[in-house]
Amino acid sequence: MSEPAIVFVGFMGAGKSTALAAAGRAGMETAETDALLEAELGCTIPEAFERDGEEAFRAREAEVVGSLLEGAEGGAIALGGGSILSERVRAALGRHVVVWLEVDAEAAWQRVSRSDRPLVALGREGFEQLLAERLAIYESVADAVVPPGDRGIAGRALPAIRALAGMPVGTKLLWATSAAGEYPVFVGRDLIAGAFAEASPLYRGQGSPRAAIAAPGRRFCLTDAAVGPLYAERLEPLAATLEVEPGESAKTMAEAERVLRELARAGMTRGDHLLALGGGVVGDLGGFCAHLYQRGVPVVQVPTTLVSQVDSAYGGKTGVDLPEGKNYAGAYHLPAAVLADTGTLASLPPAELAAGFVEALKTGLLAGGALWERVRSVESLDPTELDDVVFACARYKCWVVAADERDSGLRQALNLGHTVGHAIEAATGYERYRHGEAIGIGLLAALRLAGAEALREEVGTILDRLGLPTRLDPGAGVEAILDALQRDKKRTAAGVGFVLLARPGEPRVGEPGDPAKVRAAVEELLP
């Protein structure tokens, strides 16, 4: 097998030359196709555009870039922004690790508007339209996505990008960023099987320990009694494995204390790290304990359920429940990395998979566009066909966290359906409904409060199609739910704020709820 190259793609001004320079400093052989083209053409690219026209230039570009990619063995290559328009180039990218450097329209325009690049002549409006037209193509070829950032972001992501070449075919990488730090998110099949082996490029790392999946020191694993027997052996060598009982009942202060004391008795030090292997409960509890243990040790999230792979594993929110409310004690503790092995979804019971899909449905409602179209079209859940949904949801969640890590504005939108959903869980002792089931019912209440009648009907149809509840049990107490709702952890002196959404992609956060309308929306959920 020939060695793949790392190929940087992206729009004008995305920072491909800067990324290539970082690869050069890391000892990689590099090539920039714009420079090769100019050597071939005997003139600058602007001169070629003026002399021959764009169509002729693109034809020559496809020949030069296609030939380079077809023969490339290792190294790093930066493509011109329009190279991916060629079918030959896109086909040749198939055996390489393709890294899409994202850039927003404002930043790109500021970087290139005073240059002699020929497409700057389109003007600001035409420039932005061209970027919008190419986004889907960049996304379709990308194995790794690096979001907009400072000039050093591609260099910091490079070790994880290089590790991607040694992972199972189809694995995707997202470089997640926020104010508190950065970390790699890997999504793919059969990742757990070899990711933690001594010979794995992920375990060895390349450069900073936080730049690849391996955190420093020995591995300690927190899992639950259902997941541990299935996957813990694949993470060996482990210094110790700690198990909790499956389910929300494990998310307590008492259980956190037990885990912390067991880690101490097992001899864990600040130079070691914790693997949180399991669903959202294990991820929340493991992250919380990692934050507290000796004032903080790294945690690698290894989510094995759909709800954790599409939502809870990302962004660093950790915590446990109190009798007074869900997630009332917690901390922000970013993972050192996230390894979402979508192959683990096949081990989930159908009801658990369906409940987890509610978080994907919620994310589709928030994101709108292609993601909403994808999740709304699901007729039945095949765990082997959800990789794209997991990766798209992870991208959206990490984008929101990057904009609002500490939950002061935009990140609150992620609570769509959760205000009433969490109240239902609390009022029923966290025993009657799976988390996703409660959130699905909460979505219906939120859409009723938003006056989104047609959208509420459609969401209800989707839930029903997947075998999820759309009504509360006959014995559910409205008063208990309303009382729990008033203890929502995001309540302020002004009262409980709701996330409302009238159309996909247009959430509104912090919306006050008229008490009579809230009561009516909850009562409507009774049979």
Image: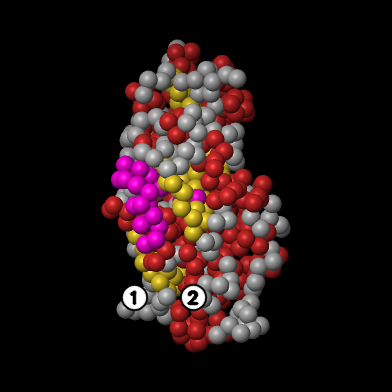
- Which residue is at the far front? 265
Q: For the view shown, which residue lies furthest in the left direction?
A: 295
Residue 153's image quarter?
Answer: top left
Residue 312 rendering spot, x and y as whole percentages: 48, 56
Residue 73 part of the magenta-drawn span: no
Label 1, residues with CA under 10 Å away: few <14, some 14-19, many ≥20: few
Q: Which residue is mark 2?
A: 426
Question: Is 260 within the magenta?
Answer: yes
Q: Nearer the viewer, residue 362 or 430?
A: 430
* Residue occupying image coordinates x 53% and y 23%: 4
Please give the range of residues in magenta: 257-277
Q: Is residue 339 visible?
A: yes
Specify whether 89 is left or right of 492: right
In this picture, is 20 found above or below 135?
above
- Helix, strand or loop at disc 2? helix
**Residue 181: x, y in percent?**
34, 46
Do the numbered discs 2 and 1 sit on residues whose CB atoms are within 8 Å?
no
Residue type, label 2: Ala
Q: Amino acid at mark 1?
A: Thr
Mark 2 or 1, closer to the camera: 2
- Please report whichever mark, 2 or 1, sits nearer to the chain's N-terminal start: 2
- In the picture, measured across the screen, residue 284 lies left or right of residue 526, that is left
Give the labeled residue for mark 1. 492
Write the residue at 43% across / 59% down.
285
Tell me the SS state at disc 1: loop
**Picture residue at 64% right of the left edge, 84% below the top:** 474
Label 2 to label 1, Cα distance in Å? Answer: 19 Å
* Label 2 Cα neighbours within 10 Å, binned few <14 / some 14-19 / many ≥20: many
